[in-house]
Amino acid sequence: MARKTANDDPLAPLTLAVGQEDLLLDRAVQEVVAAARAADADTDVRDLTPDQVQPGTLAELTSPSLFAERKVVVVRNAHDLSADTVKDVKAYLGSPAEEITLVLLHAGGVKGKGLLDAARKAGAREVACPKMTKPADRLAFVRQEFRATGRSATPEACQSLVDAIGSDLRELASAVSQLVADVEGTIDEAVVGRYYTGRAEASSFTVADRAVEGRAAEALEALRWSLATGVAPVLITSALAQGVRAIGKLSSARGGRPADLARELGMPPWKIDRVRQQMRGWTPDGVANALRAVAEADAGVKGGGEDPEYALEKAVVAVARAARSGGRG
């Protein structure tokens, strides 16, 4: 989700969208353009790349018009602007033109930091568009997408959607839109499964869930499907490790309500309930043995072995055995 500063007027003279998440950057631009066209349907929009903004370009685009038209000037990848053009932009920030909204898209790193600092000093309306690298961030994004439509989706449905789609926010947003358009009432895990069966089965988390539940045959089937559809082996070992560690954490935690355990262990309450169901049959020795097997597989898929697929199959079988027998046999 894009985060905004207190100055939340899309028609502010300057909007600064900072980050590397393309969907959020595009939405920041769309919000400004929509607001401008709501104020004036004839708003002129100029969407420019750095090579299209030369010294003098900004002055030309923002010069007074005989028709006093509203204008939105978007400069993408502003961190790549030339030094002379940056001087022009900084000069403009000191005296912005009326009826013109300038939107600067900046990656937020060290490159072009002088322009970033100048825009902030000029009182820019800032929209944070950080890259969502953590699963928890993508899960929060999906929940927010459903809330924005006024529809409800269960926590399990949101998690299943993230597991099925992956890290691409555009695809996640598109999936939410499709579900909202096609399904009435609350969207649950079964609905997500019907719409994204092939993709959900290819999820690394599906492999892990079946393995920690002791369902070796189903876990191996999901593993082969995952590999056939291009899921990276390292994602599968990561999911297996997360699944086993979650069981270890919950088994060693003191009893309590899901909400209390969620705070203690850093898991959402619904996941506490799921892991409780998965941990039947596990023992501390089983957890230790399973983690060793996953670590060996991880080394194998990262170059330590000749056959990553075989390494994964061994790990899946070992985890499923640990789930059934606590690591014995």
Image: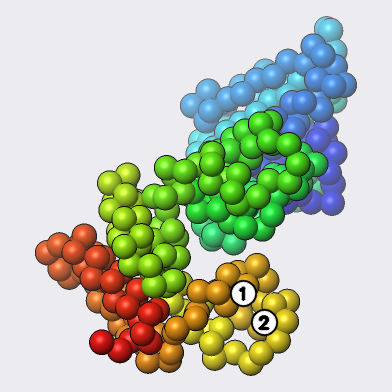
Q: Confirm or deny contact between disc 2 and disc 1 (CB under 8 A).
A: yes
User: Which residue shows up at 70% across the image and 86% down it?
Assistant: 256
Colour option used: rainbow
| Residue 244 or residue 34, whichever sits in front | 244
Tell me the residue that label 1 is attached to.
Answer: 272
- Label 2 is placed on what type of residue? Leu
Residue 84 vertical placement versus 42 (above, below):
below
For this view, does 227 lie left or right of residue 34? left
Where is residue 139 drawn, in percent x and y? 61, 56
Where is residue 76 drawn, in percent x and y? 57, 33
Mark 2 or mark 1: which comes first in sequence? 2
Quadrant of the rendering where the C terminus is positioned: bottom left
Q: Label 2's element?
A: helix
Q: Label 1's element?
A: helix
User: Which residue shows up at 50% across the image and 74% down it?
Assistant: 278
Q: Residue furthest top?
A: 66
Question: Is residue 20 in sight in this rendering?
Answer: no
CA distance for labels 2 and 1: 7 Å
Where is residue 65 drawn, in percent x and y? 80, 11
Mark 1: give few (<14), some (14-19) or many (20+) Cα within 10 Å.
Answer: many
User: Which residue shows up at 64% across the image and 37% down it?
Assistant: 179
Q: Residue furthest right?
A: 39
Tell me the residue that label 2 is attached to.
Answer: 261
Question: Is residue 326 in sight in this rendering?
Answer: yes
Q: Residue 159 appears in which quarter of the rendering?
A: bottom right
Q: Residue 192 appears in which quarter of the rendering?
A: top right
Where is residue 216 drawn, in percent x and y? 33, 67
- Label 1 is placed on what type of residue? Ile
Residue 267 vertical placement versus 281 (above, below):
above
